[in-house]
Amino acid sequence: KQEGRPLRQRQRLLVVANRLPVSAVRRGEDSWSLDVSAGGLVSALLGVKEFEAKWIGWAGVNVPDEIGQKALTKALAEKRCIPVFLDEEIVHQYYNGYCNNILWPLFHYLGLPQEDRLATTRSFQSQFAAYKKANQMFADVVNEHYKEGDVVWCHDYHLMFLPKCLKDYNSKMKVGWFLHTPFPSSEIHRTLPSRSELLRSVLAADLVGFHTYDYARHFVSACTRILGLEGTPEGVEDQGRLTRVAAFPIGIDSERFIRALEVPQVQEHIRELKERFAGRKVMLGVDRLDMIKGIPQKILAFEKFLEENPSWRDKVVLLQIAVPTRTDVPEYQKLTSQVHEIVGRINGRFGTLTAVPIHHLDRSLDFHALCALYAVTDVALVTSLRDGMNLVSYEFVACQDAKKGVLILSEFAGAAQSLGAGAILVNPWNITEVANSIAQALNMASEEREKRHKHNFIHVTTHTAQEWAETFVSELNDTVVEAQIRTRE
Ligand code: ADQ
């Protein structure tokens, strides 16, 4: 990665993502209440001070009437957000269908949907058509608000068709695209019926970014093998035009977590949790309830650990906080019941009248409660089957400077490449290996814990979300400037 050169003052950055960072609730015909989420991406982009960032995306609600749309647009403008209105049918076909049922599992090596092949093939075509239509609707809104000199940063697998739509409008628009998931091996990507069209569209961007060098390499291989283009150390070349491809590993706003630990409310939570679990080691899992997170595998590994280590049975507790997502997709409903069944069985098997080994919560926790949990944890268990990066592992490390707990981390999470030296890396499919790692983590001597924690803490506090955003945007600016110089020459 290049060192960021000084950025121009107050250039506008249009951030385009499927979802806006707000939840909108309708209070009346023309009134809305908005709740701005304080996730990593939001704080990362607020941190890029040289830019005036505006968000463009879907507000997550269906607003069929003009009065409602106008009122929501006005309310969002105060939060520097611009809505894209998608109707229910488009959301069903584009978001639940093509994005979450096709691209998401494919990019995480879970393959294309296999049941009822014919129906899938038919719906595949209509879902891809809806995907392109939705991307065009995003492009229309970007184009309407774009001013010369703006930089446009498109996010994630929902918007792979967007770079092409934008360049069709205006070839001089500076367009970057970043993928938050893994990009799979080209052998996986080539099973996708729309493989070439999506690759070509992404290549229309000036800069294409991934979390890890491996994902970037897979993308370049897909372009060379499937499209027959030339891969260079800089990216992909097509008829003299270079699309720069590089790795930009994301981070978190670590200061926000570290500061939170000083808040009286968080300290009170910490005291309560310590009291509640006194005499027991606390193990923690925090995940969206998604098949990629390997939650059943994690719980089965914990069961195996209890089976093989009877002396630990009343001395350790696993807290699994799993926030439900995509609840209208049947596979996610099945996963919820599967997890409940396994947890019930294990608690029945190893629980006593006064204590159970697993506390499983199907919900999200507020920021302060989450920080307190991270702080009291002895061992965090991140066992994703695949994960673009995994920010939970970063958040845990940021909150552990006092305790110096152990991170068990899947080797298939992007974070394994940055936190691997401090964590215990595991293959989440190997239940015995994960069970042994739990024993290793719980028995680890304090000097080793300190050494491992220090390594990871330095990484998490220096490779922040803000640095990630600045580097990407600065490199995007440079790429386009270079392209313009080439044209002038
Ligand atoms: P996600 O798949 O959502 O993100 P992750 O990176 O772990 O995964 O981020 C999840 C966020 O949600 C974290 O900030 C976490 O604190 C929060 N969260 C999860 N469960 C929660 C709960 N029960 N209660 C409260 N908060 C909860 C996608 C990719 C990742 C990539 C990120 C960023 O799948 O691989 O790291 O984008 O690029």
Image: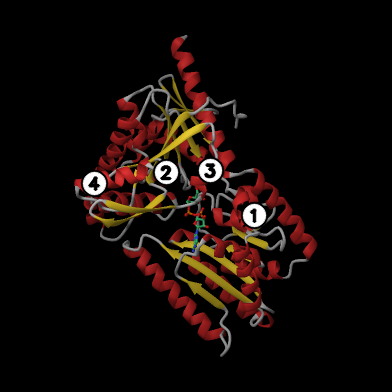
Q: Label for residue 258?
A: 1
Mark 3 or 2 closer to N-term? 3
Residue shown at 50% from the left, 24% from the top: 479
Q: Label for residue 125?
A: 4
Q: Residues within 10 Å of mark 2 (few under 14, many from 20)?
A: some
User: Alpha carbon of mark 3 to alpha carbon of mark 2: how far?
Assistant: 16 Å
Q: Which residue is mark 2?
A: 156
Of tags 3 and 4, the one toward the viewer is: 3
Q: Are marks 4 and 2 in contact (CB under 8 Å)?
A: no
Q: Quadrant of the N terminus?
A: top right
Under circle 1, the secondary element is helix
Left or right: 384 with respect to 409? Answer: left
Residue type of the residue flagged with mark 4: Gln
Left or right: 216 with respect to 134? Answer: right
Q: Is residue 232 visible?
A: no
Residue type of the residue flagged with mark 2: Asp
Residue farthest right in this picture: 447
